[in-house]
Amino acid sequence: MRGSPARLALARWTPEILLALALAALPFGFDAALHSVNLLTRILLWGLFGLGFDLLFGYAGLFSFGQSAFYGAGGFTTAFLLTSGVLSNVWLAILIGVAAAAVYGVVVGFFSLRRTGLYFAMITLAFGELSYFFENSPLSAWTGGENGLPGVPYPAINLGPIHFAFSGSWRIYELVAAFFFFGYVFARFVARSPVGSVLVAIRLNPARTAALGHRVAGYKLAVFVLAAIYAGLAGALLGIFQSYMPPDAFSLNTSGQLVFQTVIGGMGTLIGPAIGAAVWLFLRTGLQQIPYLSVLWKFILGAIFVLIVSLLRKGIGGAVLSLLKPRRWALARLDRGVLAAGEAVAPRFEAPTQPRRGSAEFALEARRVSKSYGGVRAVSDVSFAVPEGELYAVIGPNGAGKSTFLRLLSGEEPLAAGKILLYGSDITGQDVTRRNQSGIAKSYQINQLFVELSVGQNLRVAALARQRGALRFDVFRAADSIASVERVVGALLDELGLRERADHPVRELTHGEKRRLELGLALASLPSLLLLDEPLAGLSATERQEIRELIGRLRKGRTIVLVEHDMDAVFALATRIVVLREGSLLAEGIPEQIRRDRRVREAYLGGVKAPANA
Amino acid sequence: MPSLGQFLSQAFNGFAFGTLLALISSGLTIIFGTLGLVNFAHGAMFMVGAFTAFVVLSQWHSFIAALFLGAAVLLVLAVGLERGVIRFYYNRPPEDQLLVTFGLSVMLVEAVRALFGSLSQRVPIPQWGEGIVNFGLFYYPLYRVEIIGIAGALLLGLYSVLYHTSLGLVVRAGIEDPTMVGLLGIPVRRMFLIVFAVGAMAAGVAGVIYAPLAAVIPDMGTPFLVEAFVVVVIGGLGSFGGAVVGGLIVGELLSLTSLFDPAYSQAAIYAVMTLILVVRPRGLFGAEGRA
């Protein structure tokens, strides 16, 4: 449908090819009389620095204001090794500098990633300032303090008779351009890989990403360290490029300039930071030649920045990209992935063939489970056991602790007391991510979708965790290239009746479609135990019927715990019903028993007659 | 080891600087608490206050006039920024709010640089602040003693407004639940404007007070912004009490460590901040939830 494999390959590599051509052509179209070639090199250094930052901020949504720490760490480590005579091999010094930045990234990430949002920004900023201070005072014997480190040598290649020194502006440009190019290629690999998809999911909805079985903290630390590596490499090259490592590499202004350039150029575009750097550096050199405006160049940049943040959220790069390609282009990739795996798509979304573990009698067992908030006992001493393949409904008046109980089962909240067993093995101590990997998935009362992504991409994020584990760095394959994932996505699109909507972003869906997708996200984990929190809430009669039928189909081969207020649905679907009142178990039995149970009628139905004809 | 006199003198220094930091941080924290917005331009507002002091004191030599004009300049500036830019950001993600206030901060700093240049301006200590006080064990510059009084009085005033007036009640309710306050028929948007202006004025007035002790340059706000961040991370973002206690802790830490080795005074506050983050991530007085 979309052309031959060769054309697809060309489409995949288009950005890389264009970049390579641009890097090769720029020096020719460059007016050396107006600007020095060093300006180009400087733009590429900032662009390289920004590649990591864009993965961190543009993809994963982690707004660090302390990237200068790693830029400086990489730069000063390399510069120190070379100027002090410890090392003479420039390449090795760069490598060690990058490694130092990575290690520092682990340390800073360990502390700063404990918090998110504004706290994260402020903490990284403080670490950046701390690093600047360390460079300036306690470590000044090694870093040169306020003077920095002059005399950083150029690298050279010595291969027997071949000797090639990267000295002089053009040679350095070539060196930096090569690093930038391969840095870009690698960043694109990451962005297109399953890891890139998970990073975007983390930005859009970290809690759901974790609940879908992705080890969020691990991915965050990984991308934080990756950004530190890019920063360290850019810093190391800066010292070599200038033959001098300046102390202000560590300054807040460095981090600020990076943020500026990335936002102006376009977040989440990878090339954006380089575009932003070009705007910054050309504007500065340009405006400085105009009288009266020379003092105002940074003010003007600030104004441009404020305008872009306010009006052009994806920056210049994002705006250009959205003009270049029709809106569906990026989303169409999904369809291609699904179609590629199309032949293998099962007619129906099959239940997982979950191996029965041991000789466990029950799929799920809750033993004397309790939970309190402050003095309020939300759930107290609830025990029940669900045999495999049954659909248990949990009902009760508002405030009975049903949703809390479901959160305890899914692992979103820790228990105060009690035990939870899945197929006989104790999963009480597992967090939500581990439990998903163990085979529990939950659909939420309030939709927890990835709103900027398409329907297919939503399902893919969910399916990826089951197929490749909680944490994996498979950056050299595309997110849509894993056959087993695409099979699940394709089958689910059919099962949910969303095939036609696969390419549509979630915000374009109707409420009913969103509810189905919400259920689909849980299903994509291929759970052996499915938890449904009010799947029918807020739906029209027709939509309710659709979901009820869907749940009916899903029952085959699955164990389900359902919390629902729609009594018709509960009595029609459930094999057994558990009634909670004020956090305690009031009654349990088959629907007929519950319907006749006097206590249930009094407590739950307020003495009115039970729904006779469900 | 330093003598008792040196120690007390530095402890006093820390107290003076701490009250000033508390004043700046309380502005940052009430803006965050009410509007949910971390004002990256807070340091620049402090700087604008200091430059107002420079202009006024070199014209009229009246410190009282500088205080009032500093507050007035910040009031106008804050109202302009809130109406013109900030209010469009209340419903946007926190990162956007940080970005836009960062951009505004750069514009403020560069506008001042264009007007006054990058060179350091000197602001004289007011006449009634000249001289030193004999505390028995140590001598201490009079103006720094007065700083404690002025900044302390302003903090007390801010506290009274927040905790003993109906406006304060509304503001504190808004910190808890702005939607509910809006539903009760209280004009939340106008309250936001007032809080933003009060927070900005706290930073500006702190700038006026500090101007005689500092090199007044366009970039002078940055270290104060960073230190105010450290203060609110320690004290708990959004907590007035946390800003005051955090300010005093940071002030004392900076002063007392410099008694032993000035090179490590900055490191000390970051070390304490990191410790707090590990032991008590929401800060000393911070509530769960926001941020």
Image: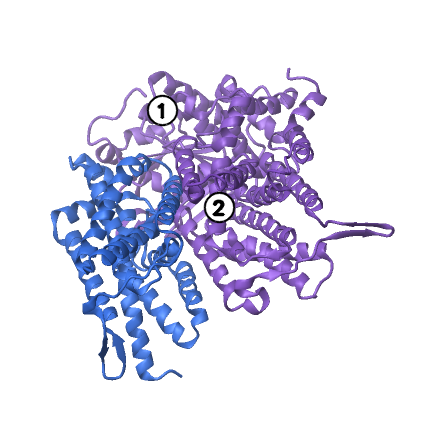
Chain colours: A purple, B blue
Confirm whether residue A344 shows in the render: yes
The circle drawn on residue A257 is: 2
- Image check: A163 left or right of A272? right
**Of B112 and A609, the residue lying toward us:** B112
Residue in the picture at 28% in, 73% down: B12
SS for dot 2: helix
The amino acid type, in three-letter code, at marker 1 is Ala
Determine whether A563 is above or below B33 in the image.
Answer: above
Residue in the picture at 53% in, 19% down: A326
Residue in the picture at 65% in, 27% down: A14
- Image check: B61 left or right of A236? left
Q: Residue A119 location, x and y as percent?
A: 39, 50
**Of A24 and A486, the residue lying toward us:** A24
Q: Quadrant of the N terminus of chain A?
A: top right
Mark 2 belongs to which subunit?
A: A
- Residue that sits furthest to the front in the current view: A291
